[in-house]
């Protein structure tokens, strides 16, 4: 549903799937600085909200998803994934338990499928699932924490918790608030914060190397590829759908692709769009070429795709991309035709944490 903050002076709507909220309010760089400094509020009310109640809610979610939730303490934010039988990512949830219910927010357009799946898995357990998107809106008072710390309990943003106490009926989820939707229009004035557009949040998210479902993921994505191990996947918990793939890659194999952070050529006016092909940079020696192009790629020589791109107020044009694991980490790339240098987010040697003696391996065979 369309956000009332789009009626704010200077507001410019974002593109799908974020078209119901503002991309910016006239000064994207100032909005980024304000958000980074804790002086802004980002309208992310296009995200959808699911509430799960009942005494079995945490143990039930623990059995279905990748994070250890059965011992989750009230007020502790975390993330979890729902995987398919092959271990591919289907849903990403950012959630908190308030002692009476689990509150989760998810990507636009995904809550109906999520709720339908959860309803099918209730069986005789004491849980109730409800899509409360029409009643609650997501706003962010801080950029996402860096990917390396997002799964830590100390990653909770204190400023969000303090501000949440002043918003009647709000639920604090780390740096985010779930606020009653009827309060959204007046929230910036109520909290004394300037509105910042989604461009500001996305630029800081990319700079923090934080992946987003549907942008840095596709129908083949497994958690190891984009750095969700530890953040949204607990490696020592009980069984859940897709765990076999997670365990196999973590112990014995490597993910076929890896997330990279790109510094883009600042002399180019346009940013590469989502899905733009990533290829080897001009002048890359033949011996540096990976073994093969991306399976099913339409671009000759394509070795990955652009997930998200933005203009950062300090770093300039940046992007996140997913490339083949075998791409050397020290070569330049082209992202949608734009020259780019890469920083490693997920290392090529991710996984394979168990070493099997070669003699034993031969005996097993």
Image (spheres, grey):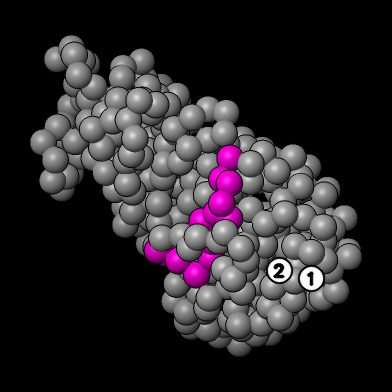
Residue 352, given in percent of the width and then of the height, sits at 43, 30
Query: To which residue does mark 1 refer?
Result: 170
**Which of the image's four quarters has the C terminus?**
top left
Q: Quadrant of residue 71?
A: bottom right
Residue 156, given in percent of the width and then of the height, sits at 76, 48
Q: Do residues under tags 1 and 2 come within 8 Å of each other at their CB atoms? A: yes
Label 1, label 2: how far apart the Cα atoms are: 5 Å
Residue appearing at x 33%, y 54% in the figure = 218
Instruction: Name the residue at the left extreme.
Output: 300
Residue 176 vs residue 113, the one in the foreground: 176
Q: Is residue 23 magenta?
A: yes
Residue 84 vs residue 284, the one in the foreground: 284
Q: What residue range appears in magenta?
A: 16-29
- Any part of residue 69 in sight: no
Label number found at residue 178:
2
- Vertical relation: 110 (above or below) 293: below
- Any part of residue 329 in sight: yes
């Amino acid at each position: 549903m369309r956000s009332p903050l789009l009626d704010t002076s200077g507001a410019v709507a974002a593109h799908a799937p974020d078209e119901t909220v503002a991309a910016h309010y006239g000064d994207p760089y100032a909005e980024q600085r304000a958000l980074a400094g804790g002086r802004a509020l980002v309208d992310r009310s296009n995200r959808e909200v699911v509430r799960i109640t009942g005494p079995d809610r945490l143990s039930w979610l623990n059995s279905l998803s990748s994070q250890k939730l059965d011992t989750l303490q009230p007020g502790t934010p975390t993330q979890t994934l729902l995987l398919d039988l092959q271990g591919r990512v289907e849903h990403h949830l950012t959630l908190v338990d308030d002692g009476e219910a689990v509150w989760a927010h998810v990507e636009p357009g995904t809550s109906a499928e999520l709720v339908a799946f959860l309803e099918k898995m209730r069986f005789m357990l004491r849980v109730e699932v409800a899509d409360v998107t029409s009643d609650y809106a997501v706003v962010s008072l801080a950029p996402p924490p860096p990917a390396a710390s997002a799964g830590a309990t100390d990653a909770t943003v204190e400023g969000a918790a303090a501000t949440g106490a002043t918003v009647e009926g709000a639920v604090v989820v780390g740096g985010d608030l779930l606020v009653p939707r009827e309060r959204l229009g007046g929230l910036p004035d109520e909290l004394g914060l300037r509105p910042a557009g989604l461009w500001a949040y996305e630029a800081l998210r990319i700079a923090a190397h934080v992946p987003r479902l549907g942008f840095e993921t596709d129908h083949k994505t497994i958690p190891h590829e984009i750095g969700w191990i530890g953040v949204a996947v607990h490696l020592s918990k009980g069984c859940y759908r897709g765990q076999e793939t997670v365990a196999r890659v973590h112990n014995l194999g490597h993910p076929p692709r890896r997330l990279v952070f790109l510094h883009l050529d600042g002399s180019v006016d346009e940013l590469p769009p989502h899905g733009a092909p990533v290829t080897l940079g001009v002048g890359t020696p033949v011996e540096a070429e990976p073994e093969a192009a991306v399976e099913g790629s339409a671009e000759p020589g394509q070795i990955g795709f652009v997930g998200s791109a933005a203009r950062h107020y300090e770093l300039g044009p940046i992007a996140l991309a997913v490339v083949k694991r075998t791409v050397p980490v020290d070569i330049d790339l082209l992202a949608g035709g734009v020259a780019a240098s890469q920083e490693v987010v997920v290392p090529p040697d991710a996984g394979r944490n168990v070493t099997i003696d070669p003699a034993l391996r031969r005996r097993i065979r």
